[in-house]
């Protein structure tokens, strides 16, 4: 009888152990499958992002967030969504998402990166005054962050695009010694000093030529067809006006005189506009050469424990 009880006890213990083993294996498989599913979701989203399929990537990141609302990579996934809208040139939506991240992750790397990207969005959408405000606030709030020097660099370029070259030079002097931007800032400062010596056309010469001989201002700018057209049109209108008043047809003369004056002034302002466009284009091409030469790009990569930034600096 004693042996029978002992046997039953051993059977029950072995059964319990077997059940525990099965449960542990099942739980392990479930955890492993969950981890694989998480990696596959975020991995596929990162793949789409890397290959420039930004709107598809948004869907996958949102899917990841929906199924993993407490995952450590959630802030990075949300940051990537904002990046997708920025890279897709939907700057208004990107700014909204970046600002949300700044509010929710203030003091954390994700929030700091988002604060910088608000300025980037304004800069890329050519809202340079707003970009200056955002970058200035970023530097004030994060003076020792590695992106602070890049913000100063971008502020200088915002001043350049606004054609405020003296402010750009002053901004470049604020770049700290030893910064990645120290060398390009010094060279860009020298480049700004060379702007007055670039090939340029004179607005005064173009205006005087156009005033003396209609079309001559356009010819000065190398636009022969436009010069010929302007000269013929103005000559015909002047001649028609002269003939009308000479024959005392005052109504027609007044009508032609009005159009004559309009075309004549348009010929002068057109020549002046061409000069300014030419000079602006020369300056832009000259300065953009430095922009392309010193191009620091920041590529965001997802990590399980947070955010990693990869740098590419072209000299």
Image (tube, rainbow, N blue to C red):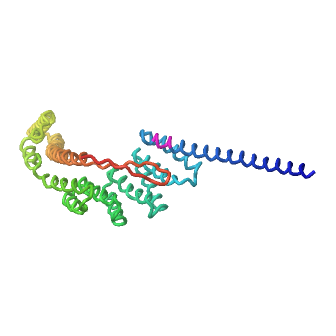
Residue at point 25% right, 62% down?
176
Image-based side of 61 in relation to 141, left or right: right
Q: Nearer the viewer, residue 232 or 210?
A: 210
**Does the magenta run of residues contain 228?**
no
Asked whether the viewer can see residue 108, the reply is yes
In the image, the segment drawn in magenta is 43-48
Q: Nearer the viewer, residue 90 or 175?
A: 175
* Image location (x, y in percent) of residue 64: 55, 47
Residue at point 14% right, 55% down?
193
Q: Nearer the viewer, residue 24 or 265?
A: 24
* Image location (x, y in percent) of residue 19: 75, 47
Q: Nearer the viewer, residue 1 or 233?
A: 1
Residue at point 55% right, 50% down?
65
Image-based side of 291 in relation to 229, left or right: right
* Image location (x, y in percent) of residue 95: 42, 54
Image-based side of 111 in relation to 127, left or right: right
Asked whether the viewer can see residue 261, the reply is no
Residue 199 lies in quadrant: top left
| Magenta stretch prevailing secondary structure | helix
* Image location (x, y in percent) of residue 180: 27, 55
Question: How many numbered marks are there?
Answer: 0
Q: Is residue 104 above or below residue 217?
A: below
Q: Is residue 129 above or below residue 239?
A: below
Q: Residue furthest right?
A: 1
**Does the magenta run of residues contain 45?**
yes
């Amino acid at each position: 009888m004693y042996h029978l009880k002992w046997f039953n006890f051993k059977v029950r213990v072995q059964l319990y152990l077997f059940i525990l083993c099965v449960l542990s294996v099942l739980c392990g498989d479930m955890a492993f499958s969950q981890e694989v599913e998480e990696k596959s979701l975020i991995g596929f989203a990162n793949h789409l992002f890397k290959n420039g399929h930004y709107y598809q990537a948004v869907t996958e990141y949102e899917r990841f967030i929906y199924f993993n609302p407490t995952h450590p990579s959630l802030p990075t996934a949300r940051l990537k969504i904002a990046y997708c809208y920025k890279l897709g040139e939907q700057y208004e939506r990107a700014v909204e998402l970046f600002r949300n991240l700044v509010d929710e992750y203030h003091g954390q790397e994700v929030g700091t990166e988002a604060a910088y990207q608000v300025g980037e969005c304004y800069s890329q959408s050519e809202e340079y005054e707003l970009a200056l405000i955002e970058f200035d606030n970023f530097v004030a709030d994060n003076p020792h962050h590695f992106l602070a020097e890049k913000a100063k660099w971008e502020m200088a370029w915002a001043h350049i695009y606004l054609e405020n070259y003296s402010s750009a030079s002053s901004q470049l002097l604020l770049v700290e010694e030893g910064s990645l931007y120290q060398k390009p800032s010094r060279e860009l400062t020298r480049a700004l000093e060379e702007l007055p010596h670039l090939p340029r056309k004179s607005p005064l010469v173009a205006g005087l030529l156009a005033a003396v001989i209609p079309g001559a201002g356009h010819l000065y700018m190398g636009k022969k067809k436009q010069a010929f057209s302007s000269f013929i049109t103005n000559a015909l209108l002047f001649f028609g006006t002269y003939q009308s008043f000479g024959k005392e047809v005052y109504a027609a003369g007044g009508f032609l005189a009005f159009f004559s004056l309009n075309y004549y002034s348009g010929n002068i302002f057109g020549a002046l506009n061409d000069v300014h466009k030419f000079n602006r284009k020369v300056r832009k091409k000259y300065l953009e050469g430095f922009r392309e030469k010193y191009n620091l790009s920041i590529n965001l990569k997802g990590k399980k424990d947070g955010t990693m930034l990869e740098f590419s600096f072209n000299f």
